[in-house]
Amino acid sequence: MKPNILKITVICASLAAASSFVSCSSCSSNAGKKGDMQQNDSLKTALEMERQRMEEPMFDIVTNMGTMRIKLYSKTPKHRENFVKLVAEHYYDSLLFHRVIDGFMIQAGDPYTRDTSKVALYGQGGPDYTIPAEFVNEYWHKKGAIAAARKGDMANPKKASSGSQFYIVQDENNCLHLDGQYTIFGETIEGLDVIDKIAKVPTDRYDRPLEDVRIITVKPVEVQIPDVASAADSTDTASQE
């Protein structure tokens, strides 16, 4: 009897070891598949975030009265690309909000406003080009909307936009008549209270603030893209353990 018992014990031990090996191999395989899925999900997320960053970039408009974070729209690419170019050139740094109307909008982007000796020309400055109108029905003059200023219809029947000047809507109820007349190319996503604060400053009879409301700088917002390589390393390590 004893030899048979020993033989059975050895067989059972072998089966247990084999079962353990199969089980561990299965766990390792499942962990590998899970890691691959997680890596693919991270890659998709990273690619989508990068696409959004390129198509609808965000910027902080930093002023001496607070910061407004804006997002540019994807369906007005000419205006988006022009704004991105001007920001890269630091074009807006030190410019004033030269036209402020409480209950309506606040306007900036005129390079003449860097020079107080040219105050009579405020509102007329900009680069030596205009941007073709890009009217999109789904974009409207809601509070915080960013729209391009332009010359009047008599001098500008095609409603082409200024190369640099823009305005930000404060009261949408008083701006809805502008829909389809001025290109809306972005919106304010943070800092609506700053718009109200600027709109409340005292102005002269030309709607110019009596005290400077200045753009300190406009800077791109860095979007945190998931580190796909690090995610892959962590899943590989987990599958090896």
Image (tube, rainbow, N blue to C red):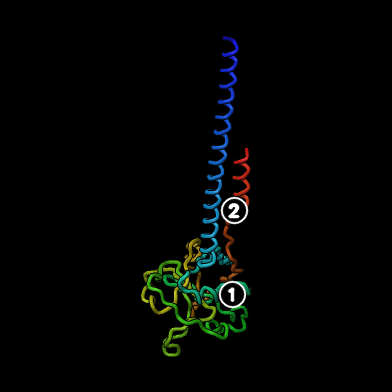
Q: Nearer the viewer, residue 15 or 69?
A: 15
Count of numbered circles on the image: 2
Residue at figure coordinates x 43%, y 78% from the top left: 182
Relative placement, left or right, of 114 versus 171 is: right
Q: Nearer the viewer, residue 134 or 181?
A: 134
Residue 56 seen = yes
Relative placement, left or right, of 150 versus 235 is: left
Residue denoted by label 1: 85
Residue at figure coordinates x 59%, y 68% from the top left: 218
- Could you tell me how far apart the alpha carbons at marks 2 and 1 are, in whole angstroms? 29 Å
Residue denoted by label 2: 228
User: Would you place residue 172 above or below residue 226 in this image?
Assistant: below
Q: x, y percentage for residue 203? A: 50, 74
Q: At numbered mark 1, what does the secondary structure look like: helix, strand or loop?
A: helix
Q: x, y percentage for residue 113? A: 59, 79
Label number found at residue 74: none
Residue 205 seen = no
Q: Are marks 2 and 1 in contact (CB under 8 Å)?
A: no
The three-letter amino acid code for the residue at tag 2 is Val
The three-letter amino acid code for the residue at tag 1 is Lys
User: Would you place residue 59 above or below residue 24 in this image?
Assistant: below
User: Would you place residue 1 above or below residue 71 in this image?
Assistant: above
Q: x, y percentage for residue 126? A: 56, 82
Q: Nearer the viewer, residue 22 or 46?
A: 22
Q: Quadrant of the C terminus?
A: top right
Q: Residue furthest bottom?
A: 155
Q: At numbered mark 2, what does the secondary structure look like: helix, strand or loop?
A: helix
